[in-house]
Structures are given as structure tokens and as C-alpha cells.
Image (tube, rainbow, N blue to C red):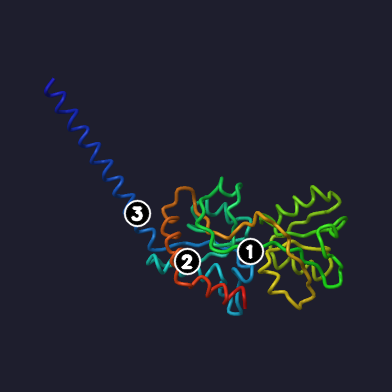
């Protein structure tokens, strides 16, 4: 019996050491991982993320994620990925964070964890100047374009429930959608208001969609990611020290 107890005790001790080593290994790997953060974005969404004249990925979201990473003592690698492949790339572990002006909708929360919201915007209906589309009711019988996978696509489908004569078309990129509106290939588009500001005076008119349930922008992570808490801590700092407001002035309120 004594020998049995001794063997059992040794076995439990060994198991505890193994578990301890395993936990320590995970902790070390986690710490090593935070030294570099791979960020996925879709660089066709000015002013949030887009390619500048030097073909560099820049924008509001990009500046924020770089400041957050700097506060964490981590390097950043940014990958340009088609918008409709972003969540898939995150789940597959190809990237650590999504910085793509994403709203933490109920459907997205089933697939990923999100940081605190860092910016709140509205949706707009945009149309070609002189189109006389001045209200939601004016969309009746019209062709409406949206970027696929965005909350604006959801809004278009909600409007379609009240106005079933609307035909909704989806596009991969916001730039493509604006091009279709300018050419008259769609009667109107539904976009985030900050995008509209970049097209003022460029053959585009628009109005805000009144919505009590506005969704904000947040960063997305794989489920149970250890990055969520440090990201939230850094976002709070950016809000407190006014750096976030400075970035809003730089990119959105310009």
C-alpha cells in the first residue's frame, strides 16, 4: 500500500509539473507573440484604411492600431486582405487583429471577440447630384448599392422590408460602389458617413439615415484572444490623453 501511495504521489507530482510546464510554456508563447502583432485590413475604405500615393497602408484605424501596439511594446505587420476574407483569415490564425472599421454586431460576436468601441459613425444614403433622392421613401423602385459584409448591407435589407421594390446590389470595395453611383449604374448607395466626406463636391449628394441603434468601430480578435484586454487598456489611454480625438481631427474632421 505504501509503495502504491508513493507511486501515486510521484505520478501526481509529475503530472502537476507537466501541467505547470505546459501553462508556463503557453504564457511564454503568449508573451513572445505580443512582441509582434499581425493586423489584417482592407485598404479601400478611406479615411479609415487606404493606400496612399506611395502605396502605403494608412488611415484612421491604422494610426490607432500602431499607437496601441506601441503602448504594448509590440511591432506591427499590416496585411491588406479583401474585406470578405478578413474574418476567415482571423479564424485561420493568419492574422491576430482586424482593423477594418468593424462594428461588433450580434452576428460578428458569434465569430470573434471585439475591443471597446473607439469611434461611432452614422450611415448615409448617397446618390448622384441632381438625382432628387432626399429621403428613404425616394429609394422606392431604385437600385441601391452597398459594400458586402458591412452593416450598411444590413441596413439596406431592413429598408427593403418596407420598400420591397428596392433592388440591392453588393460590391467588394467601397471605391467601386462610389464609382457606380457617380456613373449612375446604381441609383444610390448606403455608406458610412465618414466615407461620404471624402467625396464632397465630387458629383455626390447624400443624407444621414436616422438610427437610434448606431454601431461603433472596434478591433476584432479570435475568440479568447489574450490581446483584447491590453488593446482595451491602450484605447482607454488614447481617449484619456486626447490622442484619439487628435486622430479624428486628422483623418475624419479634416
Where residue 168 appears, as percent x and y from the top left, is 79, 54
Calculate the distance from the C-alpha at mark 2 to the C-alpha at mark 3.
18 Å
Q: Secondary structure at mark 3?
A: helix
* Residue identified by numbered label 3: 29
In front: label 2 or label 1 = 1
State the residue at coordinates (55%, 67%): 61
Q: Secondary structure at mark 2?
A: strand
Ranked by sequence position, the earlier of labels 2 and 1 is: 2
Q: Residues within 10 Å of mark 3 (few under 14, many from 20)?
A: few
* Residue identified by numbered label 1: 121
Calculate the distance from the C-alpha at mark 2 to the C-alpha at mark 1.
27 Å
Q: Quadrant of residue 67?
A: bottom left
Residue placed most toward the observer, 135 or 22? 135
Ranked by sequence position, the earlier of labels 2 and 3 is: 3
Q: Secondary structure at mark 1?
A: loop
Q: Residues within 10 Å of mark 1 (few under 14, many from 20)?
A: few
Amino acid at each position: 500500500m505504501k509503495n502504491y501511495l508513493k507511486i501515486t504521489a510521484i505520478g501526481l507530482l509529475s503530472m502537476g509539473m507537466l501541467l505547470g510546464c505546459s501553462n508556463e510554456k503557453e504564457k511564454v508563447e503568449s508573451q513572445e507573440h505580443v512582441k509582434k502583432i499581425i493586423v489584417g485590413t482592407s485598404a479601400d475604405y478611406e479615411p479609415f484604411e487606404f493606400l496612399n500615393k506611395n502605396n502605403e497602408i494608412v488611415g484612421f484605424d491604422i494610426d490607432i492600431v500602431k499607437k496601441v501596439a506601441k503602448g504594448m511594446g509590440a511591432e506591427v505587420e499590416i496585411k491588406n486582405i479583401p474585406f470578405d476574407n478578413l474574418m476567415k483569415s482571423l479564424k485561420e490564425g493568419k492574422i491576430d487583429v482586424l482593423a477594418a472599421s468593424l462594428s461588433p454586431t450580434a452576428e460578428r460576436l458569434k465569430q470573434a471577440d471585439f475591443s471597446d468601441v473607439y469611434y461611432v459613425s452614422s450611415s448615409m444614403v448617397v446618390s448622384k447630384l441632381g438625382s432628387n433622392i432626399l429621403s428613404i421613401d425616394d429609394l422606392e423602385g431604385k437600385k441601391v448599392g452597398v459594400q458586402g459584409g458591412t452593416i450598411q448591407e444590413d441596413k439596406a435589407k431592413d429598408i427593403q422590408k418596407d420598400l420591397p421594390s428596392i433592388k440591392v446590389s453588393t460590391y467588394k470595395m467601397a471605391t467601386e460602389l462610389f464609382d457606380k453611383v457617380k456613373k449612375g449604374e446604381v441609383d444610390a448607395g448606403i455608406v458610412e458617413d465618414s466615407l461620404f466626406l471624402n467625396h464632397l463636391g465630387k458629383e455626390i449628394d447624400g443624407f444621414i439615415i436616422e438610427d437610434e441603434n448606431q454601431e461603433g468601430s472596434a478591433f476584432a480578435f479570435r475568440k479568447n484572444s489574450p490581446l483584447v484586454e491590453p488593446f482595451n487598456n491602450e484605447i482607454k489611454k488614447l481617449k484619456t490623453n486626447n490622442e484619439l480625438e487628435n486622430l479624428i481631427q486628422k483623418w475624419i474632421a479634416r
